[in-house]
Image (cartoon, helix red, strand yellow):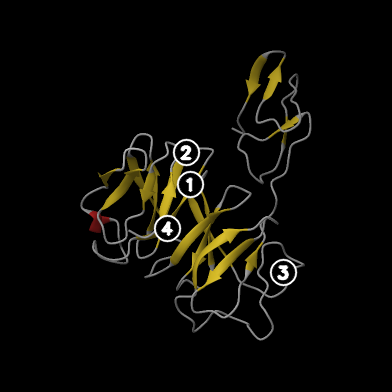
Amino acid sequence: FTGGVLAPNGHIIMVPRREVRIGDFDPTTKSFSLISMPSPLDGWQDSGTVDQNKFSGGVLVPSSGLIYFVPANSDHVGEFDPETGGFQIIDISATITGLKKYNGGVLAANGHIIMMPYNADDIGDFDPQTGTLSTIEFCRDFESNGFCNAFPSGEETLSGKEERFHGGVRGPDGHIYMVPHSINWIPKLSLSPCTTCEAGKYKAVSGNGACVDCPLGSDSTVGSTECECGAVRVWSSNA
């Protein structure tokens, strides 16, 4: 295993690296069990074989209770439901492939999972709501662009450096700080803050998406995820 996550049910979920099953440890009863993943595994690990470094770390999304496994050699993000024991994979090969892509992840204020580049050239940005992965490019001018990293003087690129970062932490200031492994500096990442919708607007999914006007004849209070007509809900989706 590589890394563990505390699940909402109090169990510690252990992220499989070479193991072909998910570890589930109950600190209360001190019992340990293994949860099977889809088989055969080599059908979805395009960049490696079953006994190689599949995932490296995991992140809990409290709003859904789901735990996401950060891909290392696997070309998929793993999604595990500790309540039901269900597991599925999300293909990211259209965005990135290769070995030792990421090492550890952090839940950002906007609900995205930020994945630390190990051998990948860019930062991974996974949206659990849509199941899509995009990348964030490193750059120098942090102050003028919140979607940007501050390089200390003399550090221009990650090119030529391997096994760069080993996990990260979201600081009290909201920035994400990456833990250096073979790098001699600590970058920080700031994502666009989550905006609260004003009265008369709503956002169906919490995050930094745009607020939408309520349909004619309905209204909402500050911070709403739906609009209501009197006591009856009339709209709760952008569809």
First in sequence, mark 3 or 1: give its number. 1
Residue assigned mark 2: 65
Mark earlier in primary sequence (2, 4) = 4
What amino acid is at disc 3?
Answer: Phe
Residue 222 is tagged as: none
- Viewport quadrant of the C terminus: top right
Residue carrying label 1: 60
| Residue contact at pointers 4 and 3, CB within 8 angstroms | no
Which one is earlier in the sequence, the residue at label 3 or at label 2? 2
Question: What's under tag 2, amino acid-wise?
Answer: Gly
Where is 230 relative to 222, above or below? above
Question: What is the x, y in percent for residue 154?
Answer: 66, 86
Q: Position of residue 22 (x, y in %)?
A: 30, 49
- Which residue is under mark 3? 142
Inter-mark Cα distance, 2 to 1: 7 Å
Which three-letter amino acid code belongs to the residue tagged 4? Answer: Gly
Using the rendered view, name the quadrant where residue 191 is placed. bottom right
Q: Are marks 2 and 1 in contact (CB under 8 Å)?
A: yes
Q: Residues within 10 Å of mark 3 (few under 14, many from 20)?
A: some
- The residue nearer to you, when weighing 212 against 186, is 186
* Distance from Cα at disc 3 to Cα at disc 2: 33 Å
The kind of secondary structure element at disc 4 is: strand
Q: Residue at x 43, y 49 (%)?
A: 5
The x, y position of residue 119, in whole percent, is 45, 73
Residue at image mark 4: 57
- Circle 2: is it few (<14), some (14-19), or many (20+) Cα within 10 Å? some
Number of residues whose C-alpha sits closer than 10 Å to that of mark 1, classed few (under 14), some (14–19) or many (20 or more): many
Residue at 29 percent of width and 66 percent of height: 48
Viewed as shown, does residue 188 lie left or right of 132?
A: right
